[in-house]
Amino acid sequence: MNSRKRLTTASTTALLAAAAVIAVIRAQAGAAEAIPAVVTQTVEGMNAQIKLGTYPAKILQNNAFTVTLTDHAGLPVRDSKLDVVLSMPGMICGDAAFDLKEVAPGVYEGEVIPLMAGMWEAKVTAESTDGSTTFSRKVKADH
Ligand SMILES: [Cu+2]
């Protein structure tokens, strides 16, 4: 009776330990999947803050998409031509391309309409007289 009780306690402890390990693995997987609404990236000295107004973005709806460009000194990058292409890697669901308009010095705005739920890849190309720079971020879309 006594040894049986000890055995039960031991297996309960093992179960709890296993559950704790699974909880940690789940938390890590969740963190890897969680792409924030705002992503900041620096490419060739140019800094882009890429922000979704609604996040996760809503499918078949207009979602505000804002890019703030600054140079290596932190000053706004003005008069750039910004194009965005949204695609879903590994799928043939079609690309969505759109332009952004400069609404304030270095702040470019547009709207994106994801066609289906899932993880999209947004490529932002900034063109100026100096050449072009491409940034990219993941965009999660939901119903
Ligand atoms: Cu797709």
Image (cartoon, rainbow, N blue to C red):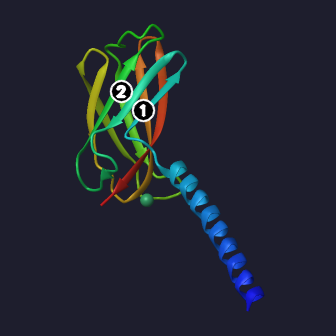
Q: Quadrant of residue 75?
A: top left
Name, please, the residue furthest toward the bottom.
1
Left or right, 91 with reference to 7:
left
- SS for callout 2: strand
Please name the amino acid that badge 1 sits on: Val
Horizontal and vertical percent for residue 57?
32, 49
The N terminus - image quarter: bottom right
Q: Earlier in the sequence, mark 1 or mark 2?
A: 2
Horizontal and vertical percent for residue 39?
43, 34
Left or right, 52 with reference to 15:
left
The residue indicated by pointer 1 is 124
Disc 1 to disc 2: CB gap under 8 Å: yes
Horizontal and vertical percent for residue 95?
40, 49
Horizontal and vertical percent for residue 50?
38, 32
Q: Name the disc covering residue 141, or none.
A: none
Q: Quadrant of ligand 1?
A: bottom left
Question: Which residue is at 42% across, 41% downward?
Answer: 36
Residue 31 to residue 105: above or below: below
Question: Which residue is at 66% across, 68% downward?
Answer: 18
Quick one: 101 or 63, which is closer to the camera? 63
Tally of marks: 2
The residue indicated by pointer 2 is 82
